[in-house]
Image: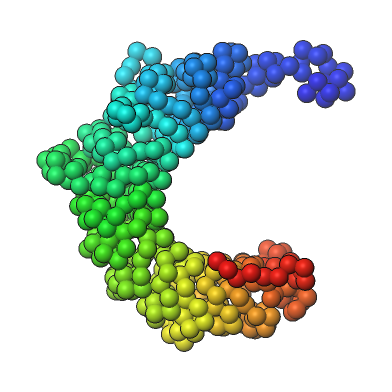
Amino acid sequence: MNSIYQSMGTSQQHSRLAYQCSKFGCYVRSLRLQGVLCTAETYVLLQQCKLERLMFIRIISDLEVNGACLLLSWHAETLLSLEFIHCQLYPTVMDKICMSVYLKGSQSHGIQQFSIKSSQICETKPLTISSGLFKILSSGKSLHLLSLRDIKMQSPFARMIIHTLLESSCDLHTLEISENNIAGWLSELNKCSTNLLALKSDIFMNSLSVLNLRENNLQKDDVVDLHKILIKMPNLRDLDISGNPVMDEGIRSLIPFISWSIQKENPLLRLTVENCELSSIGVIILLECLTNAKQLLDVLSIADNHLGSSVAAALARFLGSHVRALNATDIGLGTVGFQILEETLPTEVALSHINISKNRGGIRAAYFVSRLICRAPDLVSVNAAGNLLPPESLEVICNSLKQGTCNLERVDLTGNMHLSSNIFPAFLEFKKHGKPILVVPPNLSTSAPYDDDP
């Protein structure tokens, strides 16, 4: 700044950060702040701002906590989004921070999005949890999004969060509790909350549209309890239970909810069950349920479950059910699976996006992609990376592109080390928005042999 202003012949005073903040601070709406900068001096510099979004990173010391509280108190009237990442928010600290967000002379706040990620917020011996946090949740009538990711949460804490939300009047749309260890959290909730669920859950249950429970170590028995909660969420549109070892028994427990949810007035649109230790048996049951439904599921992800080629026929039938996006990364289709997919693919497919990467399909994967391009006029992107495609695959796929690319913008063939632009340069003639449709690896390097070890 000093160098710029000197070249313009402007006084050195104008190069100072304090001057810039006083002059242009009123236009600042979003701030990402490291803990070491949470000081009284920073608070003074930012008094002209009208912050709507605050993100704090690595708040650890008392000095940093005090600085954060000053900022929160000053911007409480305009603040809409608050996020903490890699912070130490023990109960006494959390109580102090939560008290800072309340509007002056009121016991309510205007925060709409509240997130805590990769932070410590409770003490385990004995279990001590911030009362201020629960007060924030119960008094936040404008709260739309709550994200608690990787905060060392355990089952008792999770139950208290749900209890608080059930008893609150917040119009929550998105709830994320992920990367914690909360196995068994709903069993006690269902036993002691029958009346609570029936009488006090209307606002929270009816408003929730996105539920993310990724990587919480949920077991198959947890899904049985989860089902009892899910059927009380009539507007749920997006469910993610990825990374939980629920296995086939867990998916079977979820089938009644899925059957109901995709046929209700506001149907489930997105289902993600990645890395759930599912077998082809459980996934075939799921696919048959979705294929026979009257309403359409827009997005399904079954990635990172070792299913094998036996799931291919059911998957092909599902592709004819007007699903818009499918993620089938690393499910073990192999050459046999892709051959079945190609031979049984419906004549009309409504897909827009498909990810079939890391399935070691060889030339059969190329033939499937070629046929899919011809039968899916709305197709926008295909990810076929890491499928051990041989050199002739480029010509096979290009032959289908000659029949017309329609909406197709990208076919990702990276990670297939036998392909390069030198093998079949004609692929470069197929472009969309000035960019090549086919994306291949860089030119082959003889010094770096390809290793297919997963």
Q: Quadrant of residue 406?
A: bottom right
Considering every residue shown, the one lying at the far left of the view is: 195
Q: What residue is drawn where x is 30% and y is 66%?
A: 248
Q: Position of residue 299 (x, y in %)?
A: 42, 62
For residue 443, say whether it is visible: no
Q: Position of residue 4 (x, y in %)?
A: 82, 25
- Give the residue at the far front of this rendering: 125
Quadrant of the drawing holding the C terminus: bottom right
Residue 419 seen in the current view:
yes
131 relative position to 360: left or right: left
Q: Residue at x 36, y 73 (%)?
A: 280
Q: Please name whichever residue, 54 or 177, is drawn nearer the observer in this view of the structure.
A: 177
Quadrant of the drawing holding the N terminus:
top right
Q: How many marks?
A: 0
Q: Residue at x 31, y 52 (%)?
A: 218
Q: In the drawing, does residue 293 fall left or right of residue 313?
A: left
Residue projecting furthest to the bottom: 343
Of residues 279 and 256, the one nearer the viewer is 279
Specify how the rendered protein is coloured.
rainbow
Q: Quadrant of residue 146?
A: top left
Q: In the image, residue 436 lies at what x, y percent? A: 70, 68
- Vertical side of 6 occupied by 414: above or below: below
Residue 134 in the image: x percent, y percent? 30, 28
Image quarter for residue 243?
bottom left
In the image, is residue 139 above or below residue 287? Answer: above
